[in-house]
């Protein structure tokens, strides 16, 4: 019997956990509601998130890549995780949260894109795929808000925009730091200008009174960090410590955004 290995279920991008959970926490905080539909979104979202890795492994096994002995276990993981997603979906529909169906379209599209990348022997960790994935994981914020109240309103999508921007900028920053660590040539301009564009866009939204001004503060910090990074190579001294620091930054930023809506 195959032994359960983390490579069969856990995504390789460890930072993606915070890209998923921080938006959920922010969406729940802004909605100021924690009910059973919100918990179903959390459980179903986590199962759907974990579904990607065994699905990718399964695609590779169908092409004769990987350990054939893993096939029964991977199949079982797909059945269990898929069953959890289905049960949570049925529960949400039972609570009348039909509006969440619209969020399934981009999520399914994202899963298809990753599995197609695995099928074509292309790496799923390209910049484009990471950016799409980061923005897609931020959908946990509107999912929590829609589950909480059962209806859509403008704040739902503005909060998603903030969380998607935070996640996307995190991709640029982390990729730059990793490139510096491995001494790889890397164009530093996208890091800087993506952060400038992010701050300008968020500030413009705040000026229009669509989001609270406190939500702008994290993006000021992101830009200052990007300016520090582009000046010269900034290799990572301790990768594990760096990972925890990034999680802390995501949590602090999310807390500030949520506080802006609550105060």
Image (cartoon, helix red, strand yellow):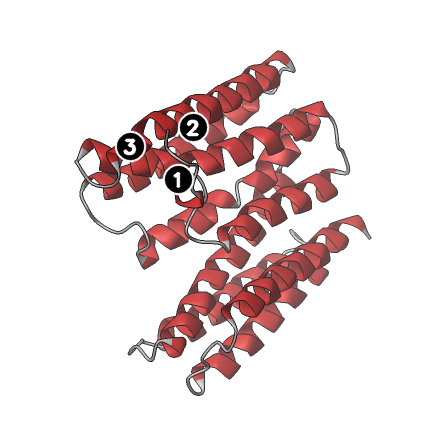
Residue 235, x across and y down, in percent? 45, 80
Query: Is residue 53 positioned above or below 95 on the image?
Result: below
For the residue carrying disc 3, how many other residues have a C-alpha within 10 Å: few (<14), some (14-19), or many (20+)? few
Work out which residue is located at the far right of the displayed protein and give it: 263
Classify the position of the N terminus by image quarter. top left
Visible residue check, residue 217? yes
**Mark 2 and mark 1 residues within 8 Å of each other at the beta carbon:** yes
Query: Is residue 20 positioned above or below 131 on the image?
Result: above
Work out which residue is located at the far bottom of the displayed protein and give it: 232
Q: Secondary structure at mark 3?
A: helix
Residue 33 as seen in the image, left or right of residue 25: right
| Residue beneath disc 3 | 69
Sequence-first tag of 2 and 1: 1
Q: Secondary structure at mark 2?
A: helix
**Mark 2 and mark 3 residues within 8 Å of each other at the beta carbon:** no
Q: Which mark is residue 8?
A: 1
Q: Nearer the viewer, mark 3 or mark 1?
A: 3
Residue 30 as seen in the image, left or right of residue 114: right
Residue 117 as seen in the image, left or right of residue 142: left
x 34%, y 33%: residue: 55
| Residue beneath disc 2 | 77
């Amino acid at each position: 019997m195959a032994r359960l290995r983390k490579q069969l279920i856990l995504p390789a991008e460890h930072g993606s956990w915070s890209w998923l959970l921080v938006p959920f926490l922010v969406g729940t905080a802004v909605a100021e509601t924690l009910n059973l539909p919100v918990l179903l979104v959390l459980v179903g979202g986590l199962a759907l998130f974990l579904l990607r890795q065994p699905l990718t492994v399964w695609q590779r096994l169908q092409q004769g890549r990987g350990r054939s002995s893993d096939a029964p276990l991977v199949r079982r993981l797909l059945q269990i995780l898929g069953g959890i997603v289905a049960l949570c979906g049925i529960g949400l529909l039972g609570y009348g949260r039909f509006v969440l169906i619209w969020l399934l379209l981009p999520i399914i599209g994202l899963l298809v894109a990753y599995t197609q990348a695995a099928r074509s022997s292309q790496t799923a960790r390209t910049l484009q795929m990471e950016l799409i994935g980061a923005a897609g994981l931020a959908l946990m914020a509107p999912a929590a808000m829609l589950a909480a109240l059962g209806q859509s309103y403008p704040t739902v999508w503005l909060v998603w925009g903030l969380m998607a921007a935070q996640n996307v900028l995190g991709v640029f920053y982390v990729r730059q730091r990793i490139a510096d660590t491995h001494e790889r040539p890397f164009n530093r301009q996208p890091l800087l200008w993506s952060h400038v564009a992010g701050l300008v866009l968020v500030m413009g939204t705040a000026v229009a009174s669509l989001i609270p001004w406190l939500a702008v503060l994290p993006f000021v910090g992101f830009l200052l960090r990007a300016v520090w990074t582009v000046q010269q190579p900034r290799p990572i001294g301790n990768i594990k410590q760096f990972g925890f620091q990034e999680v802390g930054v995501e949590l602090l930023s999310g807390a500030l955004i949520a506080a802006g809506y609550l105060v």
